[in-house]
Image: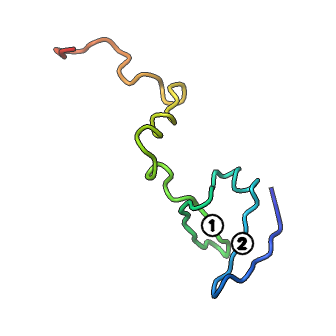
Amino acid sequence: MEIWLIIKKLGKNLGVRLPATIASEVHLHADQEVRLSVEHGRIIVEPVSIIANLTLADRLNLFDPALHGGEVMAAERVGAELW
């Protein structure tokens, strides 16, 4: 997807408004931390680790057994474990 935007002056800084379709495609939202870097004359905008800001409940909701191989201990007992 390619969209042409206009850079605006915001105080002493410059800003670009991201269209909702672009933000949605890369899972960005208002007040989210992002990292800006410059590589080969291009500006790269990357979300700061999304997982770092999630609660345990949020992380568990993201777990997909089909994607991650199902149960961690799917095998029978090995050794002398007490259950």
The residue that appears at 49% across and 30% down in the rendered structure is 68
Residues packed near mark 2 inside 10 Å, few (<14), some (14 to 19) or many (20 plus): few
Q: Quadrant of residue 71?
A: top left
Residue 62's x, y, as percent? 51, 36
Q: Nearer the viewer, residue 46 or 61?
A: 61
> What type is the residue that disc 2 sits on?
Val
**Vertical order, 74 against 2 (above or below):** above
Q: Is residue 17 above or below residue 24?
A: below
Is 2 on the left-hand or right-hand side of 68? Answer: right
**What residue is shown with label 2?**
16
Q: Residue at x 66, y 52 (%)?
A: 26
Element type at mark 2: loop
Looking at the rendered image, the quarter that the N terminus falls into is: bottom right
For residue 41, above or below residue 75 = below
Distance between the alpha carbons at the discs numbered 2 and 1: 13 Å
2 or 1: tag closer to the N-terminus? 2
Tell me the mark number nearer the camera, choosing from 2 and 1. 2
11, 74: nearer the viewer: 11
Amino acid, disc 1:
Ile
Applied colour scheme = rainbow
**Quadrant (top left, top right, bottom left, bottom right) of the C terminus:** top left
Badge 1 local density, few (<14 within 10 Å), some, or many (20+)? Answer: few
User: From the viewer's perspective, is 30 left or right of 51?
Assistant: right
Residue 75 locus on image (x, y percent): 35, 15
Q: Is residue 10 above or below residue 72?
A: below
Residue at left offset 45%, top offset 34%: 60
Q: Which residue is mark 1?
A: 44
